[in-house]
C-alpha cells in the first residue's frame, strides 16, 4: 500500500493540471495581494499628505488600525472581484488537478493492471487519499502564499474591537473570539477549513465517476448542483431562520452574511466525506473492473 | 457539404442531447416553484399584491433579475447572484461537451473525408447559436407551463408589484409598462455570444479550462459593469427596460453581435491552422 500511495502522490504532484491550476491560483492571489498592498500604501501616502501638527508629527488617521494583515489577505476580504472569484470557484479549482484521474484510468484500462497487482481496496484507498491531497494542496498553498505576501508589506496590527465593522468578523462568526485574541490562529484555522473542504470536494468526482463516463459531468455537475441547492436552501431558510449554510461564504475569514454554526460546518463536511468515501470504496471494491 | 455537417450537428448536438434539455426544463420548473412560494410570503406582507394576479412575465423576471451594479465605495459587500449564475453556468455546461467530443471522434473522420475545415467550424458556430435558442425556448416553455399551473396568466406583462417583490431600487425603477420581450431576445443573443466565446476558447485552451474562464467571465459580468462584459445585459436589474439610466438594450445587441462575429472569425483562423490529428 505504501508504494501505491507513493506512486499516486507522485502522479498528483507531477500532474500537468495540478501545476497549471496551482500556478494560476498563486498568480491570482499575488494580484489580489498587490491590490491590497497598493491600497494600503495609498492610504499611508494620503496620511503623509495631510500634513503635520505643530510638533511635527503626522496626523494619524483614526482608521489606520482598520487595515491589518489579518483582514487584507484573500480570505479576510469580503469585497473585491478576486476574493469573490477565488471562493466562488473554489469547488472548481479543487477538482481540476486530479479528481478526473480515476475516470481516465478506468477508461484507459490502467485500473485493470494495477488492481491485479495491488488489489481493489488498496487501489481505491490510495486513489481516494491522493485525490483528497490534491484538493487540499491546490487551495492550501495559494492561501498561505496570500497571507505570507500580505504579511510582508502590511503590518499585522492586533485587531481592535472598535474597527469590527471593517473586519466583518462578527460575534456570530465561528471563531470570532479567537480573531481578537489570537488572529494568526484564526487565519490558520480558516486556511485549513478551506483546504479541508477542497480536499473533500475533490473526492466527489471520484464517486460520480461510478455513474457516468463523461469527464465534464463528473467535474462540473456537482458544482452546479451545489450552487442550486445552496440557493434553494437559502430561500427555504430566509424567512425562518437566519443561518448560513453556504460553504462558499463561511469558508472565508470574513463573512457579514447569515451566521453559520460549527455544527452546520461539521455536518456538511461529514456528509460530503461519508458519501464520497462510501461510494468510492463501496462501489469500487464491489464492482467488477473487467 | 456544409448542410450535411449542419444537419448532423443539429441532430446529434441538439435532438439527441434531449436529456440535457429535460434537465433544463426541470431546473426552470423548480425555479418557478421557488418564485411561487416566495410570492405566497410576499402576499402576506403586501396583500394588495393579490389584486393584480401574476403572469408568466413575473416568473421570467424572477429568473433573470440578476443584481444591481456593485459600488465598492458604498461599503456594501458584493453578493454573488447565485440563481442567475446557475442559469448561465448550466447553459455553458450544456454546450461544453459536444464540439470537443465530435472533434475527437467521428468529426475528425468527417473533416478528413470532406476536406473542409470551414464547413465543420461554421456548422459548430450555428449549432452553438441554435443551442442558445433551444435553451431559451425550453426555459420559456417550462416557465410558462409552471406559471400556468400556479395560476398565472399567459402574458409577458410584468405585474406592478413584481419589481418591488424582487427588490428593484424604487428610485430608479421605470414607470410601467415594462418591456420584457426585448430583454428576453437580448438574453438569447447574449447566451449565443457566450456559447461562441466558449467554443473558441475550447479550441485554444481545452474545454476544461474554457469553462473555468467563462465562469470567471460570468462572475466578472456580475461584479463589474462594462460593455464587453456582456453578461450584464442579461440582467433585468441592469437593463434600461426596467431601470432608468441603465445599460441600453441596443448596445447589448451590438456588442453581442460583434462578439459572435469576432468569435466566429478568430475561431476559423485558429481552426484552419490547428493540428487536429494529434489533439487530445
Image (tube, rainbow, N blue to C red):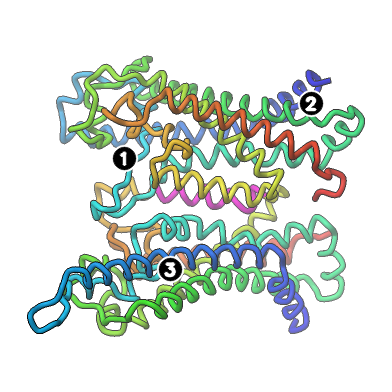
Task: Find out whether residue B24 is within the magenta segment.
Answer: no
Q: Residues within 10 Å of mark 1 (few under 14, many from 20)?
A: many
The residue wearing badge 1 is: B68
As helix, strand or loop, the secondary structure at mark 3 comes to helix
Q: Quadrant of the C terminus of chain A?
A: bottom right
Q: Are marks 2 and 1 on the same chain?
A: yes
Q: Residues within 10 Å of mark 2 (few under 14, many from 20)?
A: some
Horizontal side, residue B206 vs residue B169: left or right: right
The residue wearing badge 3 is: A33
The residue wearing badge 2 is: B119
Residue at 49 percent across and 36 percent down: it is B27
Tag 1–tag 3 contact (CB < 8 Å): no
Closer to the chain start, of discs 2 and 1, is 1
Instruction: Specify whether residue B63 is in view.
Output: no
The span shown in magenta is A216-231
Disc 2 to disc 3, C-alpha distance: 47 Å
As helix, strand or loop, the secondary structure at mark 1 comes to loop
Tag 2–tag 1 contact (CB < 8 Å): no
Task: Find out whether residue A221 is within the magenta segment.
Answer: yes
Tag 2–tag 3 contact (CB < 8 Å): no
Q: Nearer the viewer, mark 2 or mark 3?
A: 3
Q: Nearer the viewer, residue A112 or A5?
A: A5
Q: Quadrant of residue B98?
A: top right
Chain letter behind tag 3? A
Q: Quadrant of residue A260?
A: bottom left
Chain letter behind tag 2? B
Amino acid at each position: 500500500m505504501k508504494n501505491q500511495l507513493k506512486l499516486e502522490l507522485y502522479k498528483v504532484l507531477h500532474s500537468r493540471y495540478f501545476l497549471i491550476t496551482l500556478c494560476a491560483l498563486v498568480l491570482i492571489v499575488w494580484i489580489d495581494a498587490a491590490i491590497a498592498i497598493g491600497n494600503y500604501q495609498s492610504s499611508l501616502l494620503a496620511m503623509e499628505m495631510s500634513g503635520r501638527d505643530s510638533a511635527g508629527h503626522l496626523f494619524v488617521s483614526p482608521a489606520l488600525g482598520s487595515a491589518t494583515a489579518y483582514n487584507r489577505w484573500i480570505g479576510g476580504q469580503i469585497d473585491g472581484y478576486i476574493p469573490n472569484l477565488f471562493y466562488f470557484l473554489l469547488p472548481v479549482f479543487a477538482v481540476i488537478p486530479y479528481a478526473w484521474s480515476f475516470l481516465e484510468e478506468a477508461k484507459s484500462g490502467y485500473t485493470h493492471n494495477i488492481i491485479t497487482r495491488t488489489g481493489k481496496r488498496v487501489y481505491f484507498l490510495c486513489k481516494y487519499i491522493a485525490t483528497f491531497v490534491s484538493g487540499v494542496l491546490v487551495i492550501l498553498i495559494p492561501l498561505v502564499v496570500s497571507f505570507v505576501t500580505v504579511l510582508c508589506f502590511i503590518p499585522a496590527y492586533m485587531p481592535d474591537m472598535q474597527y469590527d465593522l471593517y473586519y466583518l468578523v462578527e460575534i456570530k462568526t465561528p471563531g470570532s473570539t479567537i480573531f481578537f485574541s489570537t488572529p494568526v490562529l484564526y487565519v490558520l484555522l480558516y486556511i485549513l477549513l478551506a483546504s479541508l473542504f477542497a480536499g473533500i470536494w475533490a473526492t466527489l468526482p471520484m464517486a460520480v465517476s461510478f455513474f457516468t463516463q463523461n469527464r465534464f459531468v463528473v467535474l462540473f455537475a456537482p458544482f452546479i448542483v451545489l450552487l442550486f441547492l445552496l440557493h434553494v436552501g437559502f430561500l427555504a431558510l430566509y424567512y425562518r431562520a437566519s443561518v448560513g449554510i453556504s460553504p462558499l461564504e463561511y469558508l472565508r475569514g470574513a463573512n457579514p452574511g447569515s451566521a453559520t454554526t460549527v455544527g452546520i460546518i461539521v455536518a456538511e463536511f461529514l456528509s460530503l466525506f461519508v458519501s464520497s468515501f462510501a461510494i468510492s470504496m463501496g462501489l469500487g471494491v464491489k464492482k467488477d473492473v473487467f | 457539404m456544409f448542410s450535411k455537417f449542419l444537419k448532423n450537428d443539429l441532430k446529434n448536438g441538439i435532438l439527441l442531447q434531449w436529456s440535457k434539455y429535460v434537465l433544463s426544463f426541470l431546473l426552470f420548473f423548480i425555479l418557478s416553484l421557488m418564485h411561487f412560494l416566495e410570492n405566497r410570503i410576499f402576499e402576506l406582507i403586501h396583500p394588495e399584491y393579490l389584486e393584480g394576479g401574476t403572469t408568466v412575465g413575473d416568473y421570467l423576471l424572477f429568473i433573470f433579475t440578476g443584481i444591481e451594479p456593485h459600488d465598492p465605495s458604498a461599503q456594501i459587500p458584493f453578493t454573488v447572484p447565485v440563481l442567475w449564475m446557475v442559469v448561465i453556468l448550466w447553459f455553458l455546461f450544456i454546450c461544453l461537451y459536444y464540439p470537443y467530443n465530435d472533434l475527437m471522434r467521428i468529426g475528425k473522420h468527417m473533416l478528413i473525408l470532406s476536406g473542409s475545415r470551414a464547413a465543420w467550424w461554421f456548422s459548430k458556430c450555428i449549432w452553438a447559436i441554435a443551442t442558445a435558442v433551444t435553451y431559451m425556448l425550453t426555459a420559456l416553455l417550462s416557465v410558462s407551463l409552471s406559471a400556468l399551473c400556479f395560476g398565472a396568466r399567459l402574458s409577458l406583462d410584468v405585474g406592478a408589484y413584481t419589481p418591488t417583490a424582487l427588490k428593484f431600487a424604487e428610485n430608479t425603477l421605470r414607470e410601467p409598462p415594462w418591456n420584457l420581450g426585448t430583454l428576453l431576445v437580448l438574453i438569447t443573443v447574449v447566451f449565443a455570444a457566450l456559447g461562441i466565446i466558449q467554443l473558441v476558447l475550447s479550441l485554444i485552451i481545452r474545454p476544461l479550462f474554457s469553462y473555468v474562464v467563462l465562469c470567471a467571465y460570468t462572475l466578472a459580468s456580475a461584479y463589474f459593469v462594462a460593455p464587453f462584459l456582456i453578461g450584464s445585459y442579461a440582467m433585468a436589474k441592469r437593463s434600461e427596460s426596467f431601470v432608468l439610466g441603465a445599460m441600453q438594450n441596443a448596445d447589448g445587441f451590438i456588442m453581442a453581435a460583434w462578439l459572435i462575429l469576432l468569435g466566429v472569425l478568430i475561431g476559423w483562423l485558429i481552426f484552419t491552422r490547428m493540428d487536429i490529428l494529434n489533439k487530445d
